[in-house]
Amino acid sequence: MAKVLVVTSGKGGVGKTTTTAALGAALAQSGQNVVVVDFDVGLRNLDLVMGAERRVVFDLINVVQGVAKLPQALIRDKRLENLWLLPASQTRDKDALTDEGVGRVIAELRSRFDWILCDSPAGIERGATLAMRYADEAVIVTNPEVSSVRDSDRIIGMLDSKTVRAERGERVEKHILITRYDPARAARGEMLNIDDILEILATPLLGIIPESQDVLKASNVGTPVTLNNAESAPARAYVDASRRLMGEEVAMVVPLERKGFMNRLLGRRAA
Amino acid sequence: MDVRADPTRQLVRLRGRSYVAFVFSPVVPIVEWLAEIDATLARSPGYFVGKPIVLDLAAVDLSSSAIAHLVGSLNERSIRVLGIEGVEEERLGANMPPLLTGGRACVITRSEPVQKAEPEAKPKPTSLLLDSPVRSGQSIVFMEGDVTVLGSVGSGAEIVAGGSIHIYGTLRGRAMAGVNGNSNARIYCQKIEAELLAIDGYYQTAEEIDETLRNRPAQAWLQGDTMKITPLN
């Protein structure tokens, strides 16, 4: 039974694209058939993070408008053969997306994949609403700061009212994923703590991804962080989150950087 | 075991009750009197249909067969005779309506055809219950009465109520109670972190709310034209 999962947040820059790529790769590594779909028409990034930017021929808009067939637009990952990308168009804008067109593409993807991960654009406009429109589940990416939390709250309200499932009286299963979490700063009270975030959002936690240089490093080489350095703290946190998505019980811990001796001796570099 | 229920005897209870009926008092000649009835029927056909009619034969002296003929003629005009009075019982055959006695005159109030009671429109609900959190950006407007929220009201969400507002969670957004001019409306919440509270147009913003109340159960109410915010319990 295929699952459509939207990765969304409302706010920009919190790590939706990183999360889509990392969760997609982690699910694929555990044997699932996965496609990641970029809904950020006009500002596409997922192709870069997946390292597929030089192989894009057709895109989501072409398929929505019937110019290309779905298999022509799907790009297979070079590292994992059961991981696919459906890129967005960079030259068009979100108005090129239509509700029934997106519905048709999602329905076709459902017949081919176990997981359809939709990378939502920031905001609450057409692109974001269409990315969540056909979702069965949602991962709401939240940074531990007030503006991100409030935007997430807004998005949860939309997931509960604007999706096909909500209109049928069903529920979209929602998960909070806290990213860019810095335990040291949280301990000093410079960040919202996890309990406060969950209390405000009243939604179950999927995982906590620590702030890490590894995320940026992985993006720069066009590899999902879970594939680039599987031992890194964010990679382990994303793998745990993907296992929870598949229904496994995994204890909630914040994976920490494994500091070298010199690092421990010198303390953390100032951010 | 063979259980047999004793047939319980139904007692036939007899009660007296009086009703209002139209009384026809035929006069001789009967033919002309019937013509008069016909004229009435021509003006309003069906006037007597379904109405209880009693024949008062005191003013005329009719034989058994004449009475039977009269009742038959009325039947032809769709007038059903309920009973007959002012005549000896033996003149009425077995197939005739029964003899009535003890009738009293009364004023006939022209009963309008009884209006079928309209199925009463359900009284509109005067309260609204929300059993999920109110999220940022949502606006709940309920002018008819109270709003109860079994969850939190997020920052950037708002509740507008004609009556009071009850929040069994944290109020982080705006709450506006008594917006129809109801100065008795109040706002209650389990934890107050509100952006704005208003009752009947009087409001306070987060800046003005006493810091010591923050994060505690509180209620807001109007005393004259000042808003009071006091801790609950």
Image: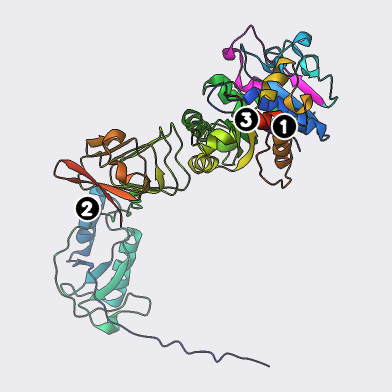
Chosen colour scheme:
rainbow
The foreground one among A135 and B26 is A135
- State the mark number for residue B40: 2
Residue B224: which quarter of the image? top left
Callout 3: SS: loop
The answer, for residue B186, to whether it is visible in the render is: no
- CA distance separating discs 1 and 2: 118 Å
Mark 1 on the same chain as mark 2:
no
The stretch in magenta equals A83-103
Q: Which residue appears farthest toward the top when viewing the image?
A: A91
Residue under the point 56% across and 28% down: A9
Task: Report in which chain the residue with disc 2 lies.
Answer: B
Residue under the point 28% across and 56% down: B114
- State the mark number for residue A267: 3
Q: How crowded is mark 3: few (under 14 residues within 10 Å), some or many (20 or more)?
A: few
- Give the residue type that dot 2 points to: Thr
Question: Image check: B36 left or right of A34?
Answer: left
User: How many discs appear?
Assistant: 3
- Give the residue type that dot 1 points to: Phe
- CA distance separating discs 2 and 3: 113 Å
Task: Report in which chain the residue with disc 3 lies.
Answer: A
Say which of marks 1 and 2 sits in front: 1
- CA distance separating discs 1 and 3: 10 Å
- Give the residue type that dot 3 points to: Gly
Q: Circle 1 sits on which residue?
A: A261
Quarter holding the C terminus of chain B is: bottom left
Marks 1 and 3, the one that precedes in the sequence: 1
Say which of marks 2 and 3 sits in front: 3
Rendered location of residue A219, percent (x, y):
70, 18
Quarter holding the N terminus of chain B is: bottom right
